[in-house]
Image: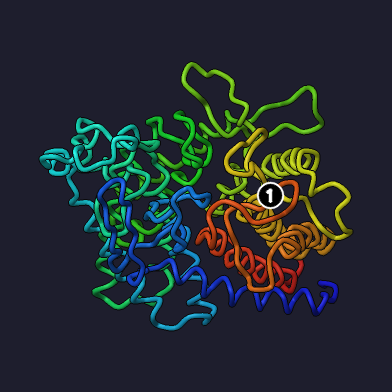
Amino acid sequence: MPSPQDPAFESWLETQLGHSARAMLSSISPLSIVKHRLGFAQTIRPIAGAIVASPVLGNYDPDPDYFFHWFRDSAVVIDALRLLYVDRQVGDEALQHLRDFTRFSLALNRLDGRAVAEVEGRRARVAPDLLQYLREDSELASVHGDAVVAETRVNPDGTLDILRWARPQHDGPPLRALALLRWAAGGHLDAPLLAEVTSLIRFDLDFTLRHWREPSFDIWEEESGHHYYTLRVSAAALAEGAAWLQGLGETAQAQRCRDESKAVLSLLDGYWIDDPDATRGYYRSRRLPDDRPSPKALDIAVILSAIHGLGTELAHGPADPRMQATLARLDALFDAAYPINQGRAAGRGAAMGRYAGDVYCSGGAYYFSTLGAAEFCFRAAAAEGGDARHWNQWMGRGDAYLATVRAYTPAGGDLSEQFDQKSGAQTSARQLAWSHAAFISCVSARRIAAAACQAPPRR
């Protein structure tokens, strides 16, 4: 049985859940916010269904400009919205948000970069010192069909991003499919909404079937190659999609998705590294062209893939001993690397970052990394079922990560992208929707784990 919890800690969890719910909702259909990118002669007025990575306007001054609809981030948010709806933290407005999101996403499929590239005088309206950040016409002209959803991000007014960025990126469609499949399975959607959601699920599954073998940029949009995270969520989407299609009587397509999902997981088995200089190996995060080494091989993205791509398989999930060993290696890495982890108070876990040597903004700890580690522990606890000893160990580890998040979260509940590795001060994008979504998902996983301990012991 679970031991009694600290009432103050439990109270903070509930209070922060309310803060995170409200903050995340402010990123969904932010119709009242107008973004002016004056140097690019752009005025962006969001439309219903867009989900911005952050509703706080920035222009790298020092806050970065995150006023975009990222395919990956928006999928994480729309899945967290489902958790809020099921938990009755939000009402039926969640269904309208889902409807708007689905229609916005379907409309994006009709975008054609050739029309943008052909606009006369497009480059002349851009400030000369910013031309280096503007995409070439030839690149824009290639964006149509499947290439749209591989764009990484679009403007929240439903137009293509005209800025240079890391493309293509293939994690958005499988993540969106996973989120929508879970919405569809909940039985909350009326027939018209279910039909629209079904159309988008089919598109995303077909995209994943066509493109999972191709190289793309990683979750951090920094290196092109074959990435554990992208492959793992692709496998999960295809597996869940197969079950969904089977239920619709589409046996042949279901079998195709099932076979491809198994092929992805088999490929990921080869990502395991037996490290002779350490007590534990780990799943490496990427395979780059020519199989050249990467200093980012040990990456929190692997752990995030285990919680974003939850499924029934033991392998490559929170119950996988090799995945648990990967978390242990990451914990040791950041425990040693970040000054804020030195001499920390009892009961706090390590603040977690992305990978060794990260230099983006403060290069420090990320809320969604630390929360992702906590959620992983809660998912592992849930998998233990009636094994009270292991359940307590995993729950304790998860709560320790949450205690660290609590220590670096202000009373108002704001969550930025990072908190500095030396001072703990919030840095990078403010009110990051993904950070709040990660908190919502983490608390949900904790509740599931608590319920699992109440289940009858396993035989």
Which residue is nearer to you in this view: 205 or 9?
9
Question: Which part of the image, by quadrant, shows the C terminus?
Answer: bottom right
Compared to residue 112, the image places residue 434 above or below, namely below
Which residue is nearer to you in this view: 119 or 201?
119
Q: Residue at x 36, y 67 (%)?
A: 33
Residue 172 coordinates in the image, percent (x, y):
40, 48
Q: Residue at x 35, y 57 (%)?
A: 246
Residue 329 coordinates in the image, percent (x, y):
74, 38
Say left or right for 130 vs 398. left
Q: Which residue is mark 1?
A: 420
Q: Residue at x 56, y 64 (%)?
A: 436
Residue 114 coordinates in the image, percent (x, y):
14, 39
Q: Residue at x 77, y 50 (%)?
A: 350
Say left or right for 6 vs 126. right
Compared to residue 262, the image places residue 196 above or below, namely below
Task: Give residue 5's quadrant in the image.
Answer: bottom right
Residue 439 coordinates in the image, percent (x, y):
61, 64
Q: Residue furthest front?
A: 128
Question: Which part of the image, by quadrant, shows the N terminus?
Answer: bottom right
Compared to residue 399, the image places residue 362 above or below, namely above
The kind of residue tagged 1 is Asp
Q: Is residue 277 visible?
A: yes
Which residue is nearer to you in this view: 380 or 219?
219
Determine the secondary structure under disc 1: loop
